[in-house]
Amino acid sequence: MISAPEPRFSHLHSLTGPHGTYEHAEHAFARVEHGYCTDDVARVLLVASREPDPDADLVALARSSLSFLDAAQSRTGKFWNRRHSGGSWSGPRTADDCWGRALWALGTTFARSPFNDLRDEAFAMFERGAGQRSPWPRSMAFAVLGAAEVLDFDPANRRALDLVLAAAPVLDRPAASPTWPWPEERLAYANAVLPEATIVVGSILGDARLIKDGLGRLAWLLALQTRDGHLSVTPHGGRDSSSSAERYDQQPIEVAALSDACLRAFNLTGDEQWLSGHELAVRWFMGDNDLGAPMFDARTGGGYDGLTAMGPNLNQGAESTIALLTTLQNARRLARVAS
């Protein structure tokens, strides 16, 4: 098993402003003028809730993130995504990715937080949001992961189960073509969440075909994104059957999604090929990638924003830092189980 550093939250704390976690950074310094987004604050709450022994600073960050999501959510359960640095919101409330990510974080907080007040508030917000539906597969996939957390703790929860049932036809889609077994004509971002959520839906509903389809698509995705024994993941511009030679700008969120999905597959099947997939994700951050470049700042604990043809993009924004942290949390959890 690969040796990985402990997740460090100092840089994430440095991105925190009066209303939440700033979205962007210039190197290690927050780009205050770019404001906040619910996508990232939900990720912050997720990573904080996954931490088994949070210190006081991380608990405070979880509380502030939950307050941000509460302010973003409407009474019908939709969410604003964009918030200016002064605290005002822009755009409509939606059931897009920000909704799905928020439900993922809220379900995880309910299931894992040791603090009853956080759990109670997160559960109330999850219940409100779980009444919404999205036509977008990724949005529903993120939401399903939150519903699965709720159902692990409360198997009879009707809102969570109804959400899983509604997600099944959104995720259960045929391959785009006989030579491209993915359910979209083009890979986009956080791709592994689609087969992971399909596996989750199949497990909850007892649907062996969905589980098989999810595992098969995850195996195909992992093989496609492995080159010469290391990950070479889908670039920022996406990838289709005619663009496999396009290698940059690789995004940390894609690597973190593979780590999560492979561990989900391992926990279900016990097949150690999935542990190998997770280890490839850890190694990508450590420098086993197309350029042999570490993808994090050992001084700050921040994750770099992307792997470009010229080397790492040295900006350390919230999304990339959280991608690093979730992958290191996964590595630490496996190491503790092994010991």
Image: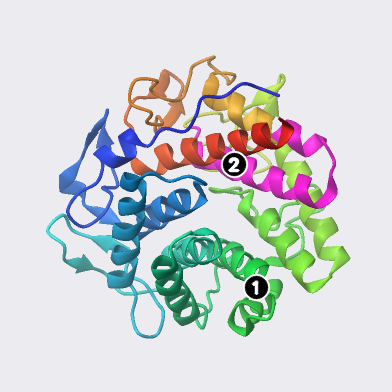
Q: Do the residues bearing badges 2 and 1 touch, measured as CB atoms within 8 Å?
A: no
**The one of 238 and 27 positioned closer to us in this rendering:** 27
Q: Nearer the viewer, mark 2 or mark 1?
A: 1
**The one of 312 and 77 positioned closer to us in this rendering:** 77
Q: Quadrant of the N terminus?
A: top right
Measured along the vertical axis of the image, is residue 52 above or below residue 316? below
User: Can residue 236 be spotted in the picture?
Assistant: no
Q: In the rendered structure, does residue 142 fall within the stretch colored magenta?
A: no
| Residue 193 screen position, x and y as percent | 62, 53
| Residue 166 screen position, x and y as percent | 65, 79
Question: What's the distance in space between the residues labelled 2 and 1, CA to CA?
Answer: 25 Å
Classify residue 102 by image quadrant.
Answer: bottom left
Residue pushed farthest top?
292
| Residue 228 screen position, x and y as percent | 71, 19
Residue at figure coordinates x 54%, y 59% from the top left:
112
Checking the image for residue 167, the label placed there is 1
Q: Residues within 10 Å of mark 2 (few under 14, many from 20)?
A: some
Q: Quadrant of the C terminus?
A: top right
- Disc 1 on helix, strand or loop? helix
Checking the image for residue 239, the label placed there is 2
Left or right of residue 7: residue 330:
right
Residue at figure coordinates x 21%, y 67% from the top left:
89
**The one of 18 and 284 positioned closer to us in this rendering:** 18
Measured along the vertical axis of the image, is residue 338 above or below residue 178? above
Residue at figure coordinates x 61%, y 34% from the top left:
331
Q: Amino acid at mark 1?
A: Ala
Residue at figure coordinates x 52%, y 78% from the top left:
130
- Figure disc tally: 2
| Residue 181 screen position, x and y as percent | 77, 51
Give, as a single range, the part of the protein colored magenta.
250-277
